[in-house]
Amino acid sequence: MLRFILRRLGFMVLTVILASIIIFWATTVLPGDVATMVLGRFATPQAKAKLRTELGLDKPIAVQYSTWLGKYARGDWGKSVSTDTAVRPVVFQRLRNSFMLAIVAFALYVPLGILLGLVAALKRNTWLDNSISVGSLAFIGLPEFVSGVILITIFAVELKWLPSQSAIDPQSTFVQAFPYLILPAITVALTSLAYVVRMTRSSTVDVLQMDYVRTANLKGLTPRRVLFTHVLRNSLLPTITVVAIGIGWLIGGLIVTESVYDYPGIGRLLLFAIQRRDLQLIQATALLIVIIYVVANLVADILYAVLNPRIRYQ
Amino acid sequence: MVEPNLNDELLDAAIMDEGVAAELLAPGNGNPRPSSWRLYWRRLKKRPAALVGTIIFCVFLFLAVFGPWVAPYDYQTQNVKVRLDAPSVAHPFGADQFGRDIFSRIIVGTRNIFLIGGFGTLVAVVIGTAIGLASGYVGGTSDEVVMRLLDVLLSFPSLLLALVLLSTVGPSNFNLVLVVAILYIPMVARVVRSMVLDLKNKEFVEAARVRGEKRSYILFREILPNSLPPLLVEASMRFSYSIFLVASLGYLGLGVQPPSPDWGLQINDARNFLPIAPWLLLFPACTIAVLVVSTNLMSDGLRQVMLPGGGRN
Amino acid sequence: MEARRPVFEIEGLHIDYATELGVLHAVRDVSLAVREHESFGLVGESGSGKSTLAMGAIRYLASNGRVTEGSVRLNGVDLLSLSGKELRELWGSRIGVVYQSPLSALNPSIVIGKQLAEVAQQHLGMDRAAAVGRVTEMLTKVAMPDPEAVMKRYPHQLSGGMLQRCVIAMALMTDPSLLIMDEPTTALDVTTQAVVLDLVADLKRESDSAILYITHDLGVITKICDRVGVMYAGEFMEQADLYELFKRPRHPYTLDLLGCVPRFDPTPQKRSLVTIPGAIPRVDELPHGCIFGPRCGFVEEACKAARPPLAEVAADHLSACRRWADVPPPAQYLREATEAVRTDVEGTRPDVLVAADRTRVHFKSTRRLIRGRAARPIRAVDGVDLEVRVGQTLGVVGESGSGKTTVARAIIGLTPATGGEITLHGKPLPPSTGKRPRATLREIQMVFQNPDASLNPTRSVGDAIMRPLTLLGGLSRQEARKQSKDLLRAVSLPVSYFERLPHELSGGEKQRVAIARAFAAEPELILCDEPISSLDVSVQGSLMNLLMKLQVEKQTSYVFISHDLSAVQHLSDAIAVVYLGHVMEIGDATRVLTPPFHPYTEALLSAVPLADPDIVQKPIRLGGSVPSAMDVPSGCRFHPRCPRFLGDICVEQEPPWREGEGDHRIYCHIPLDELTRLQAETLVLAGAEAGA
């Protein structure tokens, strides 16, 4: 088991390093001349040269990369060109805000998704299942900006129950921010909800068709007992992986949703950085998001292995 | 009297529909069974949601091809007199802040979505299939390395990778196609590879090896034709996600650039007029919703029809 | 015999399924009664509806299944009128079920003890501690070694035989009135099957339960059942007591089924088997009149007019045949319906075609990465010597994990040998297919185990057969087309199948195409890797006939690999018995099947269930299971399970090859005359009929 974890950890580090190369390559090498990109085509050659020296662009790529990664690992994430402040505190503050939003969304869609998925699986091929399945299919591909604006139109503009924008002070506490979190959280949750519903349904339907469920039934156990001790134990196991992979969706959803609601999270920050062509900020934010995603998957893998005796006692 | 059977949801479903039919109707006395395509069609007809999705999708496809000729107005023509007009007979979806006909802009905008999503998916399918076939069939260390690299690409949330790439190369239709392709290559490659791994040790492939067939023959004549159903399902799913992606990128300002009409961008522009002219926003939003939902219904229907019991999304 | 009280009675039962192809009448008007202490065998080929009948009778049906007519009573209680709740009280308490695959029948994420205790808690009103006590007691009763340890294990940590004992213990936990056993030994190896069958026979004697035993295997029936019902396409053809049914069947279908199974016959003469033409009809396309009519050798015009009812033709003997009185005794029928295929004179010894000399196939272990200990190879094939002679069949027999398939794959080059040498006509063969010239590839072909996978689903039958003709035979498409049609005829398939796709063929038909494809290259050797084991007995019989016929016509050599000793002895001129990657005994079929035996061969012969209630086999049972090919035991690799274990010498030293008459060799420390002496007094096939 320990070896399994160590191996996964090794792969994780490898993945992060390769991802950092991609990010570095995309932001530094791909654009051609960074100085032109940042300063615009009409900047003076002197200004460009100055910026290049500042950013270390006159050195070989490999040196640039290792310097950048070394600094990143040590916590020196550089200075943002657009805000003229250190990158790291801003990123972490925005990350905290995104976490607040993600947690509310998480608390919404994970339990609800599992519940709906289970109901659909148990009532499979009935109208209830069909409506849950078709409904989730509809939401799974609905971009957040579409569902977001529709939600805003209904709950903020028409009903006036909730604020239409969530441009809160980035320093707000969770309690202060909460009213502003509800609509964005629902928006983010919708896509992921659909995803969890579908995966829970399909894994539960699979388990229901297993021979051991037949055994449990023919043991004469009550339906409730069959469900709770025999079905759920096995059908919810894959849901762990599903939820972890769903974090990728969640992050994508956050980027769009934060922009729809103007919420000061990490996704909004990334967009801001992209609009301002703020390389340091883009690199720092993107890599951090990748690390979070990879760690979430690692945790899910380990959890899955720990909970699954077939892997535990290999 | 005989009691109807228990309507107990926990009773197993192992022998349902196709399962029991296959078992009880094992081909026997030379009764040819329907060909796969006819069987697919018969199954599709039984799934109204999938059928409706397919039909709506075809309507959009038609608009993508013939949009400019179907649209009642030119998408660029600004008519100051109708600025922010509510939907009317002349302008069924209303007019925008420049007095352009929203209905026409939506119709013409279809093409970009289909072009970018379609070509992006196509490129991803072609390259992904090539990688998956080669990597899966050769196996060993090279397969391990290739798959590890693709895993890295997959460890980026797709929107993030798209944003990072587009932010530096700049949004153009060509770059958008490229980005869609890059995002989906690993996913297609994985599907194809897993099919290859499944098929390459099948007895009919071994029989080909025993005959001394060339590698290319085995890959393209023995393995590839049998990977087509899952590949087709994967492609249709990729396409529906690419609509999602392209629209989202458009909304974030990194998609199709003005003056070309783009649904996402239309929505972004319309946000400022939400209190006074909600139709500016609602019609494009609903169009996206309808297209996305119908494409999803279609690709899910395809999955259920072509890979019953098997495929997962 | 006094009339025993019927425990489980089914009367006029009909079961329907609603499918995408309409309503299917899967089981029609079926009646049976199982009495106390009695074991009722439900025999039938796949698609006969035997499992549907059993599960439907206890009302365990998928949501699209429905009992439409009839009655089912357990101890007089009508099961069809019970509510769901009442039914669940019967399931698991009065009705116990044992399933085909024990591994999938147990929940993978719950320890065995808890899964078994659940039954005691649910039905016996026991608390956790009392239930655990009961489980221990039951596991002891099914002869489980170390029950306490087993209870803490997860299913994947136990072998198939152990798991099946757990499932049996679970089913018997509440002393049920009815025990349904659905092919409980089909997934097990023959030696494990023998142990489980012994256990079931013991339990039957001790408990009061009535047993409904479902199987396709006529041999297994003779070990367990008192009364037998033969099902065909959803109806009973015949019901009678075991001995009566086997010795004096009154339905042509039963007669044919008995004739499909090869008899044990240690003579070099080869006879064909009885075949049943056609295939089981689809339940939505049943023929008029007698449903077996179109395939029956006794059919008359009158049989097609109306469906004959299942009627009592003798005391306790029911048959659904109008002409039951004309059905001959099996021995007479066998003589008439089969023919001698080959009458080789003993002593002729053709040349060696292919020889394997100390062939090894070792795989690198992948577990090295995880465990970090020194890499130990998987010794799948570990020094195999054998030879195949021109025009003859070498049968290779062994349990799963014996490496028998890997031997064949090494010969043909699909899994390259890592040591030793394989020669064709005395010339060494390159290890892998990629390195063999086309002329060599042509000489060796293979027929695979799984008919569903051996043909490319997207290519037509004609394509499949033509490809080797054009590629290896160098024929033009025109010639290839003509010749492939001849080949279709040779394997008794209609030429119209040329355009068909594999999914339009039945398993047996696919295997015929695969055989035609193998012969298309005109090879000298065909490797048959369990080509018939996934098929029904009647299809197995006709395929064995086909293989024999083609061998005589084309003088092709076969390597016939199977776990089924009956099939191997039926087809083979020489037999190699393999265990854990090593040949234990090899030689002419006659010599391998008569003493002296290797102790492993002896155990295999003792474990084979023979479809003849007259035969009494001396029970020689192997304990434990086949060790992993990564941990091959020292000395003689069979020593941990050997019933004739001598002592340290077996543990410490590799046994010598003991040369017998002709090619006969035995890999054992016990001298041949000593083996002969030990085994003479315990003749394995006591009472077997000598010759046909």
Image: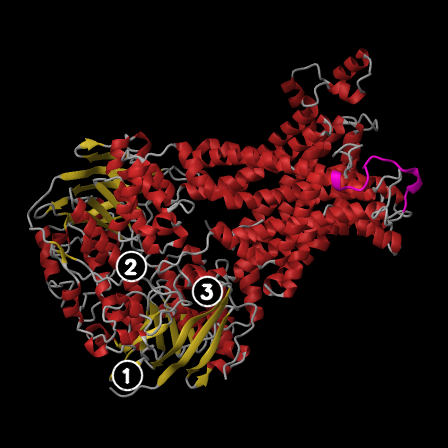
In the image: residue C692, left or right of residue B111: left
Is C561 situated above or below C85? above
x and y, in percent, of residue C645 in the image: 20, 54
The answer to which image quadrant residue C310 occupies is bottom left
Q: Earlier in the sequence, mark 3 or mark 1?
A: 3
x and y, in percent, of residue C47 in the image: 38, 65
| Chain identity of mark 2 | C
Q: Residue at x 51, y 40 (%)?
A: B192
| Chain identity of mark 1 | C
Viewer-side residue, C276 vs A124 = C276
**How far is the residue under mark 3 from the one under mark 1?**
47 Å
Is A237 situated above or below A213? above
The answer to which image quadrant residue C414 occupies is top left
Return the residue at label 1.
C312
Q: Secondary structure at mark 2?
A: helix
| Residue count near mark 3 (Cα–Cα under 10 Å), binned few <14, some 14–19, many ≥20 | many
In the image: residue C120, left or right of residue C204: right
Q: Is residue C404 visible?
A: no
Return the residue at label 3.
C113
Q: Residue at x 52, y 45 (%)?
A: B230
x and y, in percent, of residue A296 in the image: 64, 43
Viewer-side residue, C41 vs A97 = C41
Q: Is residue C519 visible?
A: yes
Q: Earlier in the sequence, mark 2 or mark 3?
A: 3
Magenta residues? B69-85
Marks 3 and 1: same chain? yes
Return the residue at label 2.
C539
Q: Secondary structure at mark 1?
A: strand
Viewer-side residue, A35 vs B234 = B234
